[in-house]
């Protein structure tokens, strides 16, 4: 998407409130065919918010074996957010819903 920050903007307020109030474990699955630098920055902000939660947070980052950029970016996020249970899941073909 061209303007990911604008797309995700409505959920940031909700996510901040949820993280502050909820102790419910969260599983955040990331499955994308393509994303750009703007989306990467937005995901960084989302992961930063999730990392502030007192609840257990699991991030599953799905990537195709053929998409080395997605694998590398997932590994980078995994290093950037050690407080999250961040899993880079490499699959032959990623099933998108």
Image: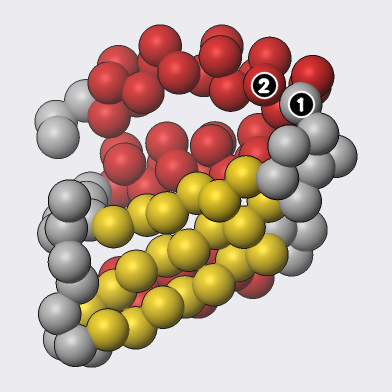
**Residue plotted at (70% across, 58% down):** 84
Q: Position of residue 87 (x, y in %)?
A: 54, 72
Q: Position of residue 26 (x, y in %)?
A: 62, 45
Is the Cβ of the residue at disc 2 closer than 8 Å to that at disc 1?
A: yes
**Residue plotted at (40% across, 15% down):** 9
**Residue plotted at (30% across, 17% down):** 6
As helix, strand or loop, the secondary structure at mark 2 comes to helix
Crowd tier of the residue under label 1, counting other residues whose Cα lies within 10 Å: few below 14, some 14–19, many 20 or above: few
The relative height of residue 53 versus residue 73 in the rendered view (above or below) is above
Q: Position of residue 46 (x, y in %)?
A: 53, 37
Position of 45 with respect to 96 (left or right) is right
Q: Position of residue 52 (x, y in %)?
A: 78, 37
Say the numbered circle drawn on residue 66.
none
Q: Which residue is mark 2?
A: 18
The relative height of residue 16 versus residue 80 in the rendered view (above or below) is above
Q: How many marks?
A: 2
As helix, strand or loop, the secondary structure at mark 1 comes to loop
Say the numbered circle drawn on residue 22.
1
**Residue plotted at (37% across, 48% down):** 40
Position of 40 with respect to 64 (left or right) is right
Q: Quadrant of the N terminus?
A: top left
The relative height of residue 67 versus residue 35 in the rendered view (above or below) is below
């Amino acid at each position: 998407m061209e303007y990911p920050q604008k797309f995700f903007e409505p959920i940031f307020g909700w996510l901040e409130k949820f993280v502050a109030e909820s102790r419910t474990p969260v599983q955040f699955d990331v499955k994308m065919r393509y994303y750009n630098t703007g989306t990467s920055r937005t995901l960084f902000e989302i992961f930063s918010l999730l990392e502030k939660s007192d609840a257990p947070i699991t991030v599953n980052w799905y990537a195709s074996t053929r998409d080395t950029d997605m694998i590398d970016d997932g590994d980078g996020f995994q290093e950037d957010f050690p407080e999250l249970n961040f899993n880079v899941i490499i699959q032959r073909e990623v099933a998108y819903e």
